[in-house]
Image (cartoon, grey):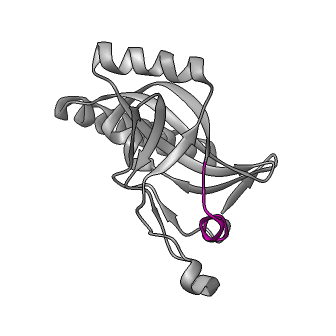
């Protein structure tokens, strides 16, 4: 787990920034069961293929994997169960309108603990086309080459 300014990052969804254009981010709490919190504190979570939907005025997180807690025995949870995200009603309504209107997606970017509470950074995202991904990779490679050349020049 990475830690900065009282925030302990449990897991990142680095692939989301590669696959989507991130338009806005929101912070949402998570409704968890007891052993899920202990597994999260141990850093045993995975956001690959996770996504969120708005159903019946609630934001639900699908496909997030939280490994069962080793000492949890019969009190353990289903690792891929649907989890409710806690947000203000006006935020949910705003998200619902933009997702329905523009065809955007809700993607979780990271899970972290802030002041002892499990939080999810949720992004309003638009899928990238293949040529956008290629452009981003070329841009990143060019920047890496420039930094390398600059560093070598500074060295002499």
In the foreground, 137 or 34:
34
Residue 123 percent coordinates (x, y): 47, 32
In the foreground, 102 or 134:
102
Q: Does residue 101 show up magenta in the picture?
A: no
Pick the quarter of the image with the N terminus.
Answer: bottom right
User: Residue lying furthest front in this view?
Assistant: 56
- Residue at position x 29%, y 36% in the image: 138
Residue 78 higher or lower than 6, as above or below: below
* Highlighted range, magenta: 31-40
- Residue at position x 51%, y 64% in the image: 45
In the image, 62: left or right of 147? left
Residue 61 percent coordinates (x, y): 44, 46
Q: Is residue 110 visible?
A: yes
Residue 101 higher or lower than 117, as above or below: above
Specify the quadrant of the image occupied by residue 39: bottom right
In the foreground, 50 or 147:
50
Residue 67 higher or lower than 124, as above or below: below
Q: Does residue 36 show up magenta in the picture?
A: yes
Residue 6 percent coordinates (x, y): 81, 49
């Amino acid at each position: 787990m990475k830690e900065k300014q009282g925030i302990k990052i449990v897991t990142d969804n680095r692939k989301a920034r590669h696959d989507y254009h991130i338009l806005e981010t929101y912070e949402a709490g998570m409704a968890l069961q007891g052993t899920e919190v202990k597994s999260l504190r141990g850093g045993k979570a995975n956001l690959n293929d996770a996504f969120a939907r708005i159903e019946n005025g609630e934001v639900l997180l699908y496909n997030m994997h939280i490994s069962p807690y080793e000492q949890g025995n019969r009190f353990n949870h289903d690792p891929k169960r649907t989890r409710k995200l806690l947000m203000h009603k006006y935020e949910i309504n705003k998200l619902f309108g933009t997702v329905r209107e523009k065809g955007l997606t809700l993607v979780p970017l990271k899970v972290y603990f802030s002041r002892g509470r499990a939080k999810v950074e949720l992004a309003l995202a638009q899928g990238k086309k293949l040529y956008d991904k290629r452009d981003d990779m070329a841009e990143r490679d060019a920047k890496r080459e420039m930094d390398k050349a600059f560093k070598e020049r500074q060295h002499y």
